Amino acid sequence: MDTKQIEYILKIAEENNITRAADKLFLTQSALNQQLLKLEKELGTPLFYRSRTNWRPTEAGEVYLRNAREILRLKKDTYNQISDIAATRRGRLSIGFTPGRGINMFTSIYPLFRQKYPDIFVEPVEKSVRELQKMIADDHLDIAFLTLRQEDHTNDEYLILVEEEILLAIPSGHPLGAQAAPPGEALAVMDIRNLRYEPFVLLEKDSTMRALANDIFKRAGFTPNLLFETHNNNTIIYMVQTNLCCGLVPSYYMRRTNDIAFFQMPDHPSWHVAASYKRNSYLSKPARLFINMVKEHWNNNPFDHPNRVHLTDLDHSE
């Protein structure tokens, strides 16, 4: 099934520029333009409004692009279904995950997955939750493992693997640090309003964690004194350890951490670790196996304070 022309047009739309699209496709601009002109002549209408810096789809172009993406999705689903029926054990699987815990999960699972499917090429992608959600929506990614709340879900599919509590982290030398529970005991509870005058370091504004943190502060009735914004929870941990600030972190980051006093909050805010994939797409047997392996990974390596959700295993029989 030759879909090269479709891929060319989608790349022009993705780049909003024919020159950049040609570079990404390793074509000359002239060759790509000829493909576009040929298609537009066949359809009898332009697909793009041309400008030097921004190519926008026309109304006809929007129709073409929408259906072109669906054609590529159907092609991929068809090949995956036939591969499962034929048990070829060959193909490609793109896996998305977030910085921090994501790479630890992937490196734990990939060697085991490769034993099962040595001829499946696995492409790991490390990006933010929002970027991964867009890649799933655009059909540029097979599966993404995300940390988010229900209200952060898009129109694609989500399988909740774990519910994880968000913790308050303060330097152990802080005057309130003495209220922390001794090691091995259940965490003490602290109202975040006790820290209304302390500096906080939080994740960047467009992250799902920041949206959750903003809700926590809104319910507490104050705006935090923001010292710093970061894209990595490990940075928050380091800055709290060095007595610079307080922070809000998922309970995963409580592991093997010194010099920090952790507290639960009275309303026990939480979010999910979830697997996401394109709505109405076919989930291949290798993809189902990978999701089950991630679920098993978190079940065997639980967070310190999650409420684990038990799901029915996805079918990954051979």
Image (spheres, helix red, strand yellow):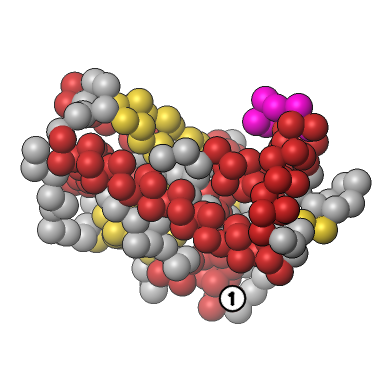
Q: Could you say which is closer to the camera, residue 75 or residue 141?
A: 75
Q: In which quadrant of the rendered image does the N terminus lie?
A: top left
- The residue nearer to you, when weighing 93 against 190, is 93
What residue is drawn where x is 70% and y is 45%?
38
Which residue is identified by label 1?
Answer: 218
- Residue 26, how many percent across, how many down? 67, 25
Seen at 69% across and 40% down, the residue is 35
**Residue 237 showing in the rendered view:** no
**Residues drawn in magenta:** 23-29
Q: Is residue 110 above or below residue 169?
A: above
Q: Residue furthest right?
A: 52
Q: Position of residue 60 (x, y in %)?
A: 68, 66
Quadrant in which residue 63 is drawn: bottom right
> What x and y, as percent, mark residue 204?
64, 52
Reply above or below: 213 against 286.
below
Q: Residue at x 21, y 60 (%)?
A: 309
Of helix, strand and loop, which one carries label 1?
helix
Identify residue type, mark 1: Lys
